[in-house]
Image (cartoon, rainbow, N blue to C red):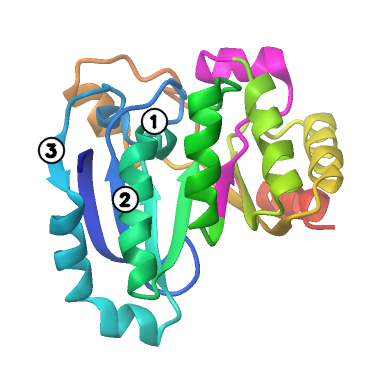
Amino acid sequence: MKGYIHSIESCGTVDGPGLRYIVFTQGCLLRCQFCHNPDTWAIGSGKEITVDEIIKDLTSYLPFIQASNGGITVSGGEPLLQLDFLLELFTECKKLGIHTTIDTSGGCYSQEESFQKKLAKVLELTDLILLDLKHINNEKHIKLTGKTNKHILEFARYLSEKNTPVWVRHVLVPGITDNIDDLKQLKDFINELNNVEKIEVLPYHKLGVYKWKALGLRYPLEGVEPPTTEMVQVTNNILLS
């Protein structure tokens, strides 16, 4: 089994507990205006890497990863676009006792029968979901990402029903995702879920702007600066209260 992979980071520290071996998959349906990896958008491209190759590389870092209570995180792009690959990868990881995490926007969640069956099998092998909730307001979500959020919120409720542990992540973009009423509505939605272990506010940054330019794309948030410390604190007060 091969996956379409953008890149691999051997010792990440911000995508789940402990040290993480992070696999960035290729392909995404969303077109987030603040995306720092637009080079992961194209579906069916990237390096074709087998599960065996990843496991072989991962095991060389395993003593450090397990000593920190870390594990593997599959990010993107959108990992759920490659459920067959995820299933085989996590099956092999569990044979080695490795903690498994998926970092997802839920942007490809579907009620289609084959997707549901594969997803259920993957979640049986998944210890944690990092769920990126971009915007609670549907119209603003469409403007921000190019897609509705209805199926994404449905995915969040599905994970709650399955009692799959979730860390909710929200990127704080001044003038776009920092509206007080929207944040309160987001908090109300999170309160409906019974599986949220942690909420992380991720301040917007401009580290990926050069990638947009390298790809010949116009960066849509030109002139938008990272949020102030005060703005981050206000958001934390709302979402973490």
Q: Nearer the viewer, mark 3 or mark 2?
A: 2
Q: Amino acid at mark 1?
A: Leu
Q: Residue at x 55, y 23 (%)?
A: 113
Q: Position of residue 139 (x, y in %)?
A: 69, 12
Assess whether residue 137 is covered by the magenta stretch.
Answer: yes
Q: Amino acid at mark 3?
A: Lys
SS at badge 2: helix
Q: Residue at x 82, y 49 (%)?
A: 238
Q: Nearer the viewer, mark 1 or mark 2?
A: 2
User: Are circles 1 and 3 on residues that touch, CB within 8 Å?
Assistant: no
Q: Position of residue 133 (x, y in %)?
A: 62, 37
Is 31 displayed left or right of 62 in the figure?
right
Q: Amino acid at mark 2?
A: Glu
Closer to the chain start, of discs 1 and 2, is: 1
Residue 90: which quarter of the image?
A: bottom left
Tag 1 residue: 81
Q: Position of residue 1 (x, y in %)?
A: 20, 43
Q: Position of residue 101 (x, y in %)?
A: 47, 57
Is 121 displayed left or right of 187 in the figure?
left
Read off the magenta span. 129-147
Closer to the chain start, of discs 3 and 2, is: 3
The quarter in which the C terminus is drawn is bottom right
SS at badge 3: strand
Tag 3 residue: 47
How far is the residue under mark 1 from the one under mark 2?
A: 14 Å
Tag 2 residue: 88
